[in-house]
Amino acid sequence: MTTFKRASRALTSKLSAIYTCNFHPVTSLSHFSYTHNASFCSRPRQNSKEGSTIDLNQYPSDNIRNFSIIAHVDHGKSTLADRLLELTGTIRKGHGQPQYLDKLQVERERGITVKAQTATMFHRHKFLGSDTDFLLNLIDTPGHVDFSYEVSRSLAACQGALLVVDAAQGVQAQTVANFYLAFESNLAIIPVINKIDQPTADPDRVKAQLKSMFDLNPSDVLLTSAKTGLGLEQVLPAAIERIPPPPGKSTSPLRMLLLDSYYDEYKGVICHVAIVDGALHKGDKICSAATGQSYEVSDVGIMHPELVATGILLTGQVGYIVSGMRSTKEARVGDTLHHTRTVIQPLPGFKPAKHMVFSGLYPADGSDFEALNHAIERLTCNDASVSVTKESSTALGLGFRNMEHTSFPLFLQCHIFLSTQMEGMVQNPAALPSNPKNRLIACWEPTVLATIIIPSEYVGSVISLCAERRGEQLEYSFIDSQRAFMKYRMPLREIVVDFYNELKSITSGYASFDYEDSEYQASDLLKLDILLNGQPVDAMATIVHKSKAPRVGRELVEKLKKFIDRQMFEIIIQAAIGSKVIARETLSAMRKNVLAKCYGGDVTRKRKLLEKQKEGKKRMKRVGSVDIPQEAFHELLKVS
């Protein structure tokens, strides 16, 4: 089991040639035509002084539309984004590989979007009786449950969203979560039922679900097939007519929302930003509202869909900046950037990255520590959600404490209160005091709000699973005659390891699951120590709920007994809570036959040899050490 869930976000952006196109209203993608004749181009004219730089001054706020595509995993977001890029001539039809905006290797391998991507498109549409050129900023967001914060920050830069739903699968858990993210942000929501070309597609049933769950008017739903191009001619006109322009003021001081960032080995940190108020020019000096650090903008432009320098970004526009930041940790997602020496009100909604899961990472061979250190530095250079500090363990040697928003856990952060009137956040179980004077009085653990959508016949099994995982039912209803909707408050530690696998197993793969961070709640948590011959092993200490302590203790000592090699002395493996031992296993000693040379004689001679051996084993037990193989730690991670 790997410690990090996310792949490294090493992105290298390269400028690509800008193609011009002649766009005509069409009913299918096969009618597209491309030309290099600038006089017939519906794309923006190029500034002769800047060469290839696009002139953004011809697009006032009223001619800008910022929208996002939100959906459940595998409902066709990225494919729809491809078709819209082709429809506007931003990329050539068939140019590059499918899912053009998914640039990470893990995204292309698994066909999922991990990192939100932005693309600027230009489109001519007959609006209010005349042909008008529009600048459209499209943000393709992740659909996976672990990236809800990234989705929320992307939506903060938009005024509308395309809510994409699979015509066969219907409304899923992430569909519900993403809808409410958009609804709470007061965005104009355009429902799109995709994949209507599939044999199992049932658009009428999905329309009824959208009406039942979200009160969306069935007449407002767009029916499309991103794969074949069917119905796509409705999407951009609907976005222009139903989504309002950005509300910012061009005369106000500059305020930029930082949407995302990544590290480029040539340019440094590249930040994706949305201009809420004012304007930004190349060479401006800007300041971060979160950190107070100042920078000089060395490059500014748009993603079209690759980086294209424009020298300026105006109110309502979305683009990128290069400001000399050395690490993505300086670029905090959701931060407000502004001109230095100006006083502004920071944009609402910024939340510093809150680490929820803490994991230990140690090399199997101590000589590999420097190589591991170098690899982790490269990872953290691109992913600001990961924070790493060096630490040492008696059992494992030198290693790292990884703090990430989502990860396979060794320990989840808890808030504790001790009898000595001390309180604080604990990031490592070994840090909890064992002294009876510092007795643990109260403990609070992080919880999540879990959304589950399942076929009706699996309701009983799922309720039993959630009850076993200490879930509290908050809502239970039926979407239609075939599917049920449930909402639970659950401890985070109960879902991060294998809850999703079990849920999929008992529902034959038909369950849809999503969760979002919630508050801390009081819980009967205990520190469980593992002792080898009476000595605690700090790396194996864990926090368990009181009701599960006996079972977890037994499982831990049984697994350890299988993986620890026998020694010349007896090894006692214990699981203890404080001074109380709740589980024990004994690994018998390897015994040498010291009586082999005694072929006869008095029995006292044999007893003397046996007593001498017994005393030797006692002495070895006092001074001997027990080597715990790495496989044992991997197996212990599987014990919830």
Image (tube, rainbow, N blue to C red):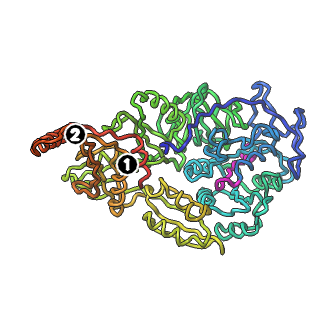
Q: Image quadrant for the C terminus?
A: bottom left
Indicate yes or no whether the magenta region holds residue 61.
yes
What stretch of residues is rendered in magenta?
A: 60-75
Instruction: Look at the image and say whether residue 182 sits in the magenta stretch.
Output: no
Q: CA distance from mark 1 to mark 2?
A: 30 Å
Checking the image for residue 459, the label placed there is none
Residue drawn at the location 42% of the way across and 39% of the way down: 361
Task: Using the image as rendered, state which of residue 71 and residue 366 is in the foreground.
Answer: 366
Q: Earlier in the sequence, mark 1 or mark 2?
A: 1
Say which amino acid is labelled 2. Answer: Ala
Q: Picture coordinates of residue 394 (x, y %)?
A: 30, 37
User: Which residue corresponds to mark 2?
Assistant: 596
- Mark 1 element type: helix
Residue at figure coordinates x 63%, y 44% from the top left: 116
Residue 104 location (% of width, % of height):
63, 39
**What's the residue at 45%, 65% (across, down)?**
471
| Residue 464 located left or right of residue 269 | left
Q: Toward which corner of the image does residue 505 lie, by quadrant?
A: bottom right
Q: Which residue is mark 1?
A: 562
What type is the residue that disc 1 sits on? Lys
Q: Do the numbered discs 1 and 2 sit on residues whose CB atoms are within 8 Å?
A: no
